[in-house]
Image (cartoon, rainbow, N blue to C red):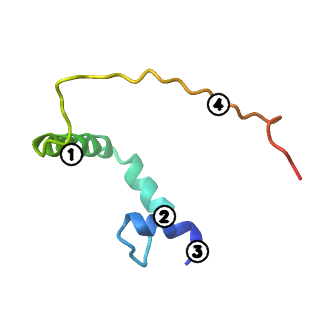
Amino acid sequence: MGDENLVMRWLMGNIVTVPSYRTINRFRVHPRTKTLIKRLYNLFRTQLTSLGLIDDSALYIDGTKLAANANKYTFVWR
């Protein structure tokens, strides 16, 4: 097994067989995926709130703006 699959193996519980990028992409573009992720997020947030790990009495909006500094002139070819 190649080294490119180590991260995916770890995320999936260190299993031996890792799904291909086509399998992951089919899941990613499926019409129900957006609804599923939203429901999972809401369940996760509810669980964290019930455990007292987050406080929902205040709302903060992060206005951080990051500028990319990569163009064809910033790379050094050797």
Q: Quadrant of the N terminus?
A: bottom right
Where disc 1 sits, the SS reads helix
Which residue is tagged 4? 68
At label 3, the amino acid type is: Gly
The single residue placed furthest to the left in the displayed view is: 50
Badge 1 density bin: few <14, some 14–19, many ≥20, Cα 10 Å: few
Which x, y percent locates residue 2? 58, 74
Compute the Cα span from label 4 to label 3: 31 Å
**Which mark is first along the chain, 3 or 1?**
3
Which residue is tagged 2? 7
Residue at 12 percent across and 46 percent down: it is: 51
**Which mark is first along the chain, 3 or 4?**
3
Compute the Cα span from label 2 to label 4: 25 Å
Q: Nearer the viewer, mark 2 or mark 3?
A: 2
Which residue is tagged 3? 2
Where disc 2 sits, the SS reads helix
Say left or right for 65 vs 17: right
Compute the Cα span from label 1 to label 3: 33 Å
Where disc 4 sits, the SS reads loop
